Image: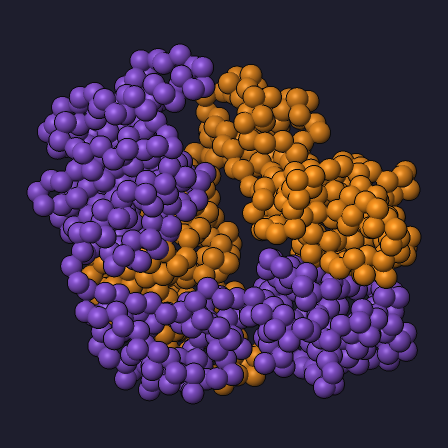
Chain colours: A orange, B purple
């Protein structure tokens, strides 16, 4: 089946916002064997919307539309689709309930503008949106499926994951599709590709491998299709077991697992605790760890020792250490990790100290230099890295590397 | 003038790569008063390319094409355009020289595949590409300008900045365009729309307002066009001054400014310092603050006091306070903020304690409940909120609200 993605929004056409929805949606749809024919980014204009939808219906089986569903005047997608499909707007009781609850729980009175969010074209099926107030609308017109959803990324992702992808996958009939995602860390895309080259080239013809790189990580998506799901599962398991033999040190998990999640499971199983002492990452490691529900079972907390004074005050780093070796040094990283572990009474402690830039670099310690130390019962492990010199990427890469190092030690 | 951007590449349609070229190009073109009508992402397929270019020529004055110019089999843009414009391929001596130099400088022998990169349609003007081997081609066909350039971001950016934008700007008539972004916080999209309704509806007809909501914030983009840029600027300033009168407490900045940036500027100007004591936000506030280059000038660091033990140990929260009122309470939040400010010796301290979920809620304190306290010279300010019950959104909203509260106090 072929699909067209239409992203509506003036902000996308003046370059104010990068269209990250399209690539996320495309990767998910490709995953259920729906191929994207075209991605069309257009203005909040009735003519542009109508023209784009009509053209897409001419060529694709499925049209996925994002954007233009907010409560304000510049959001016109719903009215335009209603007009195009010659329908009339009616109140959807479920959406009205959802909108009312949303405002009631926040003690905010419901206005007419908000009530109008519950209006939908009579000819559509409403797919409940539990994370926002704009309804998702599923149309079946002239044998084509047209889906209109909010452009807010987390609402779009929630709707796709919880409702739309399972419904779309069900359209496939008897052909079964199986995806397995293998989560790797600690190796770049091209080196990984070289290491697994012979494994990859010997995959059966109904298999396909995609590399999905992120900051410091690569997820591998192994997709296959066939008539029998149990057979596909058994075969995939064998292939992945073979892969595991080739790169055991890089595979930390499967599916949607993240490093902080995998680390959390290991710590919980062993009854161990963790603390963080962050300088250059400025709370990013703590943030990633506490994104996991139930992190309080093993994560005690930590210190963002951004200033040298706090490194001494809260972690007991010696003044002479900073004077002699600098705040960005092996010695400071080690004292931060050990001080954190001792003072916060945990089994493991991660410490980072580096130069995220753009300022603060020197010839000896250029921007991008970072020390990561991990203290635990077995001793203190440390390593120096040189990561990208863009601040945000540097913090992200350091965080991932620190978590990967911790995972290797715990496991 | 209107333009269409066509991005060619299978990798964009399977979601392997996010299309960052389009937004960058759009922002640059918008800056020289060329408006993007549509962004079209299509496959490396001759039919798709022809169809998309023909359609774009029908509606736009300028068509900018990226991608499909590499040396390998799947790159077919050049041949397809040559066929479409009924031209023949000839060797471009300048490009051949560039390709030869490129390989000679790397001591790599020049192959036929590489030599073929110097072939271009006879009907085009070659724009020299000094940072790669694929030529950039400028066509003028039936009164339209069609430009084909490499999809590699840094080659595209080099060509745009050095050659294409100046050439395109020179085509211009006299119409000017002006965008101003107004950054608001502390009020939802629909309430904001209500508050500024009469201001919005009295905007002159050459003005347009867009609402760009994010977690806990709404950016307003005011766009206008006319003959004289100074006149547009003066008029926009007046309109924004009037808006400022209506919602002074919600406008924290303009353009690309963020709350942590604005707070940083205020703190730096006043020579004041800041620390954070985070429970439910788990380092997210520290992370947002340290994303700003130079944050070490005013941000000393903080504590992620995730466990009750650390609230006591690092911040001096009384054991009896937690026993009597609970960790998520006004009293604990106040003691965290005050303890943080005193122990870390800063002028301001932000504290958060809440239930981010999914577990941990009760009837009295449901998931989503959060206390935010800010301690400063004038005293300690605190407030209770009920935010979305999805963990990530809860942390995000609490962080934004805490920063907004701090901004209101400092300003």
Q: Is residue B294 visible?
A: yes
Q: Residue B219's x, y, as percent?
A: 44, 70
| Left or right: B285 as drawn, with respect to B324 | left
Q: In terms of depth relative to the viewer, which is nearer, B284 or A115?
A: B284
| Left or right: A230 as drawn, with respect to A375 | left
Toward which corner of the image does residue A282 lie, by quadrant?
Answer: bottom right
Q: In terms of depth relative to the viewer, which is nearer, A95 or A369?
A: A369
Residue at the image point whose x is 27% and y is 28% from the top:
B76
Q: Is residue B337 above or below residue B1?
A: below
Residue at the image point whose x is 48% and y is 60% from the top:
A155
How many numbered discs sit on the rendered protein? 0
Residue at the image point whose x is 40% and y is 52% from the top:
A19
Q: Residue A261's x, y, as percent?
A: 70, 47
Q: Is residue B279 above or below residue A53?
A: below
Residue at the image point whose x is 70% and y is 57% from the top:
A283
Q: Residue B142's x, y, as percent?
A: 8, 42
Q: In terms of depth relative to the viewer, which is nearer, A324 or A309?
A: A324
Q: Residue A110's x, y, as percent?
A: 46, 83
Instruction: Tell me the quarter of the image containing the N terminus of chain B.
Output: bottom left
Q: In terms of depth relative to the viewer, which is nearer, B287 or B281?
A: B287
Instruction: Tell me the quarter of the image containing the C terminus of chain B.
Output: bottom right
Identify the residue at the far left of this view. Answer: B142
| Left or right: A280 as drawn, with respect to A60 | right
Q: Is residue A124 visible?
A: no
């Amino acid at each position: 089946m072929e699909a067209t993605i239409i992203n509506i929004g003036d902000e996308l056409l003046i370059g104010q916002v990068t269209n990250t929805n399209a690539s996320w949606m495309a990767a998910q749809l490709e995953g259920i064997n729906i191929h994207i024919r075209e991605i069309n980014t257009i203005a909040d204009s009735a003519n542009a919307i109508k023209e784009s939808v009509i053209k897409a219906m001419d060529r694709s089986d499925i049209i996925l539309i994002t954007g233009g569903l907010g409560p304000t005047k510049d959001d016109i997608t719903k009215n335009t689709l209603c007009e195009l499909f010659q329908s009339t707007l009616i109140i959807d009781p479920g959406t009205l309930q959802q909108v009312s609850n949303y405002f009631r729980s926040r003690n905010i009175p419901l206005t007419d503008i908000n009530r109008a969010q519950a209006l939908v074209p009579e000819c559509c099926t409403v797919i409940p949106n539990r994370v926002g107030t704009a309804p998702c609308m599923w149309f079946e017109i002239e044998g084509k499926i047209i889906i209109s959803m909010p452009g807010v990324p987390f609402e779009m992702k929630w709707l796709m994951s919880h409702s739309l992808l399972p419904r779309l996958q069900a359209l496939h009939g008897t052909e079964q599709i199986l995806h397995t995602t293998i989560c790797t860390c600690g190796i770049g895309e091209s080196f990984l590709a070289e290491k697994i080259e012979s494994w990859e080239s010997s995959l059966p013809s109904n298999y396909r491998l995609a590399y999905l790189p992120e900051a410091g990580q690569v997820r591998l998506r192994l997709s296959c299709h066939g008539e029998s799901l149990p057979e596909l599962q058994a075969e995939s398991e064998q292939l992945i077991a073979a892969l595991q033999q080739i790169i055991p040190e890089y595979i930390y998990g499967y599916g949607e697992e993240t490093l902080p999640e995998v680390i959390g499971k290991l710590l919980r199983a062993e009854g161990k605790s963790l603390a963080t002492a962050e300088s250059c990452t400025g709370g990013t490691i703590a943030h990633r760890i506490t994104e996991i529900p139930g992190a309080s079972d093993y994560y005690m907390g930590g210190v963002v020792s951004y200033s040298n004074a706090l490194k001494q005050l809260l972690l007991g780093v010696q003044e002479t250490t900073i004077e002699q070796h600098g705040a960005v040094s092996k010695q400071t990283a080690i004292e931060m990790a050990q001080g954190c572990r001792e003072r916060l009474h945990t089994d493991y402690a991660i410490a980072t100290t580096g130069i995220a830039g753009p300022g603060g670099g020197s010839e000896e310690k250029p921007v991008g230099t970072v020390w990561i130390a991990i203290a635990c019962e077995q001793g203190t492990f440390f390593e120096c890295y040189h990561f990208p010199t863009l601040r945000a990427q540097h913090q992200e890469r350091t965080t991932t590397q620190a978590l990967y190092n911790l995972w290797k030690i715990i496991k």
